[in-house]
Amino acid sequence: MPQNFVYIIVVSFLLSACKQNTLDVDVSDVTINEIKTLRLENDLFALNKTNYNQNTQFLKTKYGTFYDRYIFSFLNKKGAYDSTSKSSILKFIADKDMRQAYSYVTKIYSDDKLQKINADINTCAKRFKYHFKTRQLPSKLITCTNCFNYSVAYVDSALVLGLDNYLGDTAIFYKMLELPLYKTRCMTEQYILPDLIRGWLLTEFDNAQPVNTLLYHTIFYGKLYYCVNALLPNTPDSLIIGYTQKQLNYCKSNEKNSWAFFAEKNRLYENNLKIVQELTSEGPFTGAISRECPPRIAMWVGWQIVKSYMDKNKNVSLEQLMTEKDAQKILSKSKYRP
């Protein structure tokens, strides 16, 4: 074999090694208590007038305090333990639209499919323990239907997944509800894991701070997406942040211009809530910049700042990053210059 050919192979190998995702850590030796999946939607729709009294007592034991929260939130404002709950629950499971939605859920999300999702969640939990050794892990994943309300939640150590919010972007129910395209586009199976992990982290690392500058929110969500990426290192950025590939391409090709927009006129230190919301809220686009600019552009810029910060400060752990409240410190030490 010619020597120059060997040289090309070696160089190619080294280059590919350099491109390895540093967030894709080895968790083969990390042990956790397995997160079990409980399917509340199946248990709930199995109720009827004959078995109600016996089975609801079982559900209260099986799902703990979440069962009462669930009934209170969606079916009966007096909760699961009130005498009026029986008629409310039976009415809900007899409703034509709710039964049709449940039928869609069972067709799309078989037990086998949920086992695969559960396996991915357990891998994420191992990565979480790798980075956050002293923090508590979820004990279970509870799936349910919730009248198309919240998609994910983290309640009483349980990850909660509203499966009726992931029936596919063309689901008839979403058309009936007249949901906008920018929302239904993300109501598909591929968004379940990123949404679940983001919801978990939002609860773990509370954003309720008495700071309302654009800089604070930009860095907070930058940290959040960076951490989601660390727990899902092989998931495309577009799924993590909920962009189309076209929107992500816009962000990358206009990164300098976006940064210039935030840097000029000290916009990062803006505390006008209306302006902060314009640059961090969901929608079809960021109107403050252009109709081509994706929504939540400040969050994407924040993600790039945090990437730069972690790249230039390799001694900073993920725990230290997520608990760092000084947004200005992260910005300054990131030396972010696209």
Image (tube, grey):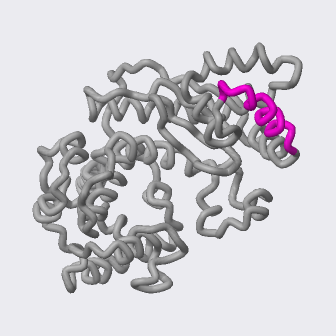
Quick check: can you spot residue 5? Answer: no
Quadrant of the rendered structure where residue 200 is?
top left
Instruction: Tell which of 62 and 123 is nearer to you.
Output: 62
Give the side of residue 49 with respect to residue 69, left or right: right
Residue at left offset 21%, top offset 73%: 269
Q: Quadrant of the C terminus?
A: bottom left
**Coordinates of residue 191 in the picture (x, y in percent):** 56, 51
**Coordinates of residue 5 in the picture (x, y in percent):** 29, 55
Quick check: can you spot residue 11? Answer: yes
Q: Is residue 295 magenta?
A: no
* Vertical position of residue 169 compared to residue 23: above or below: below
Question: What secondary structure is the stretch in magenta mostly built from?
Answer: helix
* Vertical position of residue 207 compared to residue 113: above or below: below
* Residue numbers of the magenta segment: 80-95
Give the side of residue 17 with respect to residue 292, left or right: left
* Vertical position of residue 307 compared to residue 301: above or below: above
Give the side of residue 251 with respect to residue 178, left or right: left
Residue at left offset 76%, top offset 64%: 175
**Coordinates of residue 40 in the picture (x, y in percent):** 67, 29
Instruction: Tell which of 248 and 58 is nearer to you.
Output: 58
Instruction: Tell which of 19 and 273 is nearer to you.
Output: 273
